[in-house]
Image: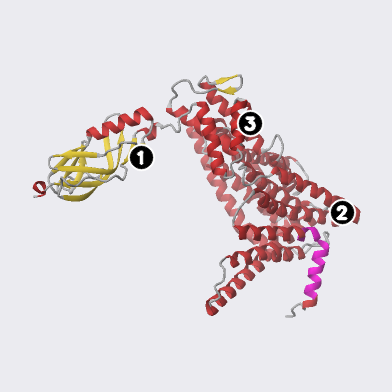
Amino acid sequence: MKFPSLQKLQQAIAQVLQRFPLEIFCAATGTAVALWLLETERLDDERVRLLLCAVLGLVLFLSATVFSESKGLSKPQLAMLRVAVVLALALCWFSLAPIENETSVMRYALYFIAFHLLVSFAPKTALDNFWEYNKQLFLRILLAALYSGVLFVGVCIAIASANFLFSLQVDEKIYARVFIIIAGLFNTLFFLAGIPTDFSVTQSYPKGLKIFTQYVLVPLATIYLAIILAYEIKVIVQWTLPSGVISWLILGYAVYGILSILLVYPVRHQEENRWISTYSKWFYVLLVPLLPLLCVAIGVRVLDYGITEPRYIVLILALWLTGVTGYFLFTRQYNIKVIPMSLCLVALLSAWGPQSASSVSERSQIARLNDMFGKQGLLSDGQLQPVSISLPDSAGTEMLAQVRFVLDHYGPASMQPLLPNALFDSLQVADTIKSKHHRQTKQFEIVREYLGLKPYYVTSARRDFFEVAAKADSVALQDYDFLTPVAVNGHVTDTTAHAYIKNDTLYWRQANLSFNLSPLLQREERYADSTGIYQHTDRPQQTLVVAAPAAMLVIQRITFQRDSLARKVVFLNGFVLLKETERN
């Protein structure tokens, strides 16, 4: 085996740098920023945004390069194309705030998917060449990952060995640094070196792909289909609404099926591969009865809880899948480019603009908030009004959670039309708090107090559950001679146990004592009902003491439940104080 000389290796690196200068610049920038973040151990919007845009820039510049080469553009034309990429990156920069704005995470994910799909169809090629180009990209990605992984493991073993043998006291961050450098620079250089230069070359079809498709992907898709169809029959027979999980199963079936069709596309017309054409046809036919089930499953969640970014994505994928199914069922042109091109367009439209996931979900959640307050008569002239009535706990809990959700996900600006200007000014003042958590908490408290909502409401499920803990105060022992810890599980009903609880009474067989807990439990119920606080640990002047002749039960923590018929102590722990006469 002949290994490449250092001179050839140097020439190969120089060729990559000459062919992909801006791609390498983005990779180097991203690597430097990642190392910077690692050393400072502090995340901020500017540096994280620079890192994310460097990743997007690498993919966008690669798309521009391969498009230019496939079209034979001149250097001035390529320069103009790269300027357009810079402008696109500037738009990405200003539309992202990954640390401060939670919706930016979804937006970036959509950018990431859209721009990677763009690379797949950026070169202008025939369909067969299009498939071959993407096959080479896919295999190069796998090969780059393999080489990078082996190199990373090898370097880490070398560092760890040297550290152990020579007691070097190596900083543990060195392994993260090595990973960032290899992933950011070596992996990128290796991958770019394998990008084809001739987009019209067609190589032999790898037989392993056909085997993988025929014996792995197609059976998996068939299993998914069987499960989904059986569930759909169950839904129809029982006439019930479908579970939300079925949406992901249908999308999983679609992914496996479409991937299967794409992988065997070049050999679909060969005599021995007639099953491919049959499978392709029936795949889309069998999608037809699944699409209504998919739409109903996601539609039910949207009607109940409004649109959020994840629900928007599922909904838009359902619409995209419907369009793709219709295209391949009714067109004679079997153009597989439609799949990545349409999906790229859908991702871009979902990422930015008034029709984007964040914009649509924000409007939906604001409308849901208005509807909640409107049902309670607390909406006037399009603004939320302070609570002036006693709210049901379920309604209060829902309104409180919705206010918090809107503020945390879309920021105070989303609620500006719903609140007085003076209150919005207070929110802007709170916006200067550096800590994201503290800022969001402060803004939520400002809105909550203005709206007159309780700190929290207790739902019917929590209303029956009480948890009380005593403050760690000292207990006078001068009147007692002995102290014995006690812990009781309320679910234990065995009357031969050393301690058990029955009918609000603690029976302690060690000294044949009993402590009536009813007065204490009734007092805690009254306090909870009057304040809405069912779990507390530091209520002022709190005492959890139950007296008995010549003994005293000091409770440190007690939990109990209440229903319409009776109470039940779930757990109690503390200690018992005894006098000498009682112990004997």
Give the mark nearer the N terminus: 1 vs 2.
2
Callout 1–callout 3 Cβ contact below 8 Å: no
Name the amino acid type tagged 1. Answer: Asp
Pointer 1 residue: 538
Which of 93 and 65 lies nearest the eye of the viewer? 93
Q: Is residue 538 left or right of residue 583?
A: right
Secondary-structure class at tag 3: helix
The part of the image, by quadrant, that contains residue 503 is top left
Q: CA distance from mark 3 to mark 2?
A: 40 Å
Name the residue: 56% across, 73% down. 160
Instruction: Check disc 2: other Cα within 10 Å, few if <14, some if 14-19, many if 20+.
Output: some
Instruction: Find the magenta span and give its range.
Output: 8-24
Q: CA distance from mark 1 to mark 3?
A: 41 Å
Q: Which residue is mark 3?
A: 363
Query: Of helix, strand and loop, which one carries label 2?
Result: helix
Reading the chain from its start, which is encountered first: label 3 or label 2?
2
User: Where's residue 347, x and y in %?
Assistant: 70, 43
Which of the labelled discs sits on residue 555, or is there none?
A: none
Q: Amino acid at mark 3?
A: Arg
Side (left or right) of 483 relative to 94: left
Q: For residue 302: magenta?
A: no
According to the picture, the residue beneath numbered tag 2 turns out to be: 78
Separation of disc 1 and disc 2 at Cα? 69 Å
Task: Please indicate whether residue 533 sits to the left or right of residue 405 in the image.
Answer: left
Q: Position of residue 49 (x, y in %)?
A: 68, 50
Magenta-drawn stretch contains 22: yes
Foreground mark, 1 or 2?
Answer: 1
| Quadrant of the rendered image containing residue 288 | top right
Q: Nearer the viewer, residue 161 or 451?
A: 451
Q: Nearer the viewer, mark 1 or mark 3?
A: 1
3 and 2 marks in contact (CB < 8 Å): no
User: Where is 275 relative to 147, above or below?
Assistant: above
